[in-house]
């Protein structure tokens, strides 16, 4: 892949991340933040284009721009920072507050009313907390929430269910009840005004299902991936030639259908899990682009809060597991129809015409099983178009299983160990991938994406109740899939397999 195209891809992904995650919390223009983030990869790209890949870049020229731009990004972000809804609930002085990051729930933006309930309603609210379930000690008022602090005396599931029913009986759907742990580990309840109950809310007026839009994006993405599929199949990218000869266009269908099947089933896994738990969610939408892979993937949006960590876990793991299950047979079939080529200096993890599979334990095992003795020590793989789609599916699975922020892996770790531990794991993961990028430069795009992705995700309404053993085991299975995809082949195994 041309290095300028690689930079373009990084730039597009970085802009989408910045636009989605920080545009609503800072007054600093998005393009300035994006320009700061893109300076380090821009310097790396310029060096490679001028001096080539054979001339190593001075370490100082790598580290200094990265450190300076990271600090500048942080300064620009916080100097223009707005008062977010979660900060309206949690005052800016961390020494006087035990409340963690609050969920991004649609709430009223009127900060003038610090007491959303009157004295009579406060007295009635106290009666919603049976002393044998949750001993209520005090009620604190924030601009956008009523915090109820005390001591938990029952199982978290029982406490949340009982108190939620009492609050709903008293206030109806006027409030959302959040059950979360403070920084000291003490569970507390928060009543947040529910904008979803407001008939004027945009959440009620905006249509949830748009089958016409979903179908249109599906068809456009099928076209763009088919066009890119012709390039993967070995034809030059010439619109006139492709459209004048339908036979060439048909050569791109295997890649397009395989890739869209993998991405579509991944998102359908999330969607079906959301439907099962009666969570409002949009249909899966594909993102077409006329270059690179032909698509930026697919996504769904959930429009209602996650009830608890069990639901968070199930919705998060359903996508990558479903995508992984369909990826394996497609990748294996594609590898059986791929060719072996001599390994060279151009062989790498992003070269589909000369892919070195040894960076991944799983890919190596599948390649050896599919190609047998043809895959030897000094060989690489020229991927069949279906194998290219399967390989991309493997990369998508690994990226989504990264235990960082709002990625599926971040949700899984959060559900298994809690939000605070999940954030710590996310920070460690980002640093590890950044370190690996210095050893394997092809991982730079992952490092950049993960580095500027928020380390924490949104808590569930009941974010205290823990998972059962069965879900913990499935979570370890999902993280094991990530490890065997990213883990290089040990030298002992390469000797045994003669690769």
Image (cartoon, rainbow, N blue to C red):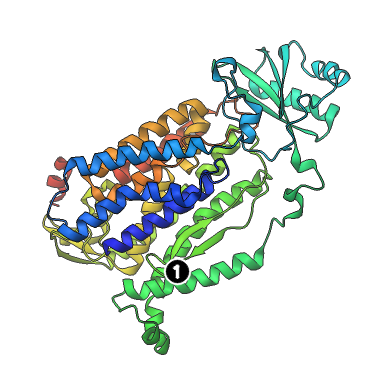
Along the viewing direction, whichever of 227 and 52 lies nearer the viewer: 52
* Residue displayed at 66% across by 47% down: 303
Quadrant for the N terminus in the image: bottom left
Position of residue 381 relative to residue 143, above or below, is: below
* Residue displayed at 39% across by 40% down: 451
Residue 30 horizontal/vertical position (percent): 49, 50
Dot 1 surroundings within 10 Å: few (below 14), some, or many (20 or more)?
Answer: some
Position of residue 484 relative to residue 54, above or below, is: above
Residue 409 horizontal/vertical position (percent): 45, 40
Res. 348 in view: no
Residue 499 horizontal/vertical position (percent): 14, 52
Along the viewing direction, whichever of 374 and 24 lies nearer the viewer: 24
Query: Which residue is situated farthest in the right direction here?
Result: 120
Hey, which quadrant is residue 294 in on the image? bottom left
Left or right, 18 with reference to 284 = left
Hey, which quadrant is residue 479 in on the image? top left
Helix, strand or loop at label 1? It is helix
Query: Which residue is situated farthest in the bottom direction here?
Result: 244
Give the residue number, with chain letter if any, for mark 1: 257
Res. 36 in view: yes
Left or right, 424 with reference to 348 = right
């Amino acid at each position: 892949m041309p290095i300028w195209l690689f930079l373009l891809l990084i730039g597009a992904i970085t802009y989408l991340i910045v636009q989605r995650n920080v545009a609503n919390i800072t007054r600093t223009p998005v393009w300035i933040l994006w320009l700061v983030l893109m300076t380090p990869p821009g310097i790396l790209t310029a060096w490679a284009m001028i001096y080539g890949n054979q001339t190593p870049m001075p370490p100082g020229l790598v580290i200094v721009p990265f450190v300076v731009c990271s600090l500048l990004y942080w300064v620009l972000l916080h100097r223009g920072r707005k008062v977010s809804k979660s900060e309206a609930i949690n005052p800016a002085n961390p020494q006087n507050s035990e409340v963690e990051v609050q969920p991004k729930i649609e709430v009223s933006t009127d900060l003038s009313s610090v007491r959303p309930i009157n004295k009579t309603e406060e007295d009635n609210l106290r009666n919603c907390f049976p002393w044998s379930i949750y001993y209520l000690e005090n009620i604190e008022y924030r601009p956008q929430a009523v915090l109820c602090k005390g001591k938990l005396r029952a199982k978290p599931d029982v406490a949340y269910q009982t108190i939620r029913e009492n609050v709903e009986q008293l206030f109806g759907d006027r409030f959302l009840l959040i059950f979360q742990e403070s920084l000291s580990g003490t569970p507390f309840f928060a009543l947040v005004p529910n904008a979803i109950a407001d008939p004027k809310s945009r959440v009620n007026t905006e249509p949830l299902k748009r089958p016409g839009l979903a179908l249109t994006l599906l068809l456009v993405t099928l076209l763009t991936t088919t066009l890119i599929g012709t390039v993967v199949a070995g034809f030059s990218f010439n619109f006139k030639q492709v459209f004048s000869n339908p036979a060439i266009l048909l050569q791109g269908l295997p890649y397009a259908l395989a890739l869209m099947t993998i991405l579509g089933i991944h998102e359908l896994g999330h969607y079906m899990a959301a439907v099962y738990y009666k969570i409002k969610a949009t249909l899966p939408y594909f993102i077409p682009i006329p270059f690179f892979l032909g698509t930026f993937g697919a996504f769904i949006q959930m429009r209602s809060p996650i009830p608890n960590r069990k639901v968070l876990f199930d919705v998060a793991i359903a996508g990558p597991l479903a995508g992984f299950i369909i990826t394996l047979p497609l990748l294996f079939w594609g590898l059986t129809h791929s060719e072996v080529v001599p390994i060279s200096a151009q062989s790498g993890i992003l070269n589909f015409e000369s892919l070195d599979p040894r960076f991944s334990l799983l890919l190596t095992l599948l390649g050896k099983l599919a190609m047998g003795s043809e895959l030897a020590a000094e060989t690489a793989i020229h991927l069949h178009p279906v194998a290219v789609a399967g390989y991309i599916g493997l990369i998508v699975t690994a990226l989504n299983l990264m235990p960082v922020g709002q990625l599926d892996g971040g949700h899984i770790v959060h559900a298994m160990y809690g939000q605070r531990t999940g954030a710590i794991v996310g920070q460690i993961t980002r640093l590890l991938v950044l370190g690996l990028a210095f050893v394997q430069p092809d991982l730079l795009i992952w490092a950049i994406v993960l580095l500027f992705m928020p380390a924490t995700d949104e808590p569930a309404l009941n974010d205290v109740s823990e998972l059962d053993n069965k879900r913990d085991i499935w979570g370890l299975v999902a993280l094991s899939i990530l490890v065997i995809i990213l883990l290089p082949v040990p030298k002992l195994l390469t000797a045994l397999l003669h690769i």
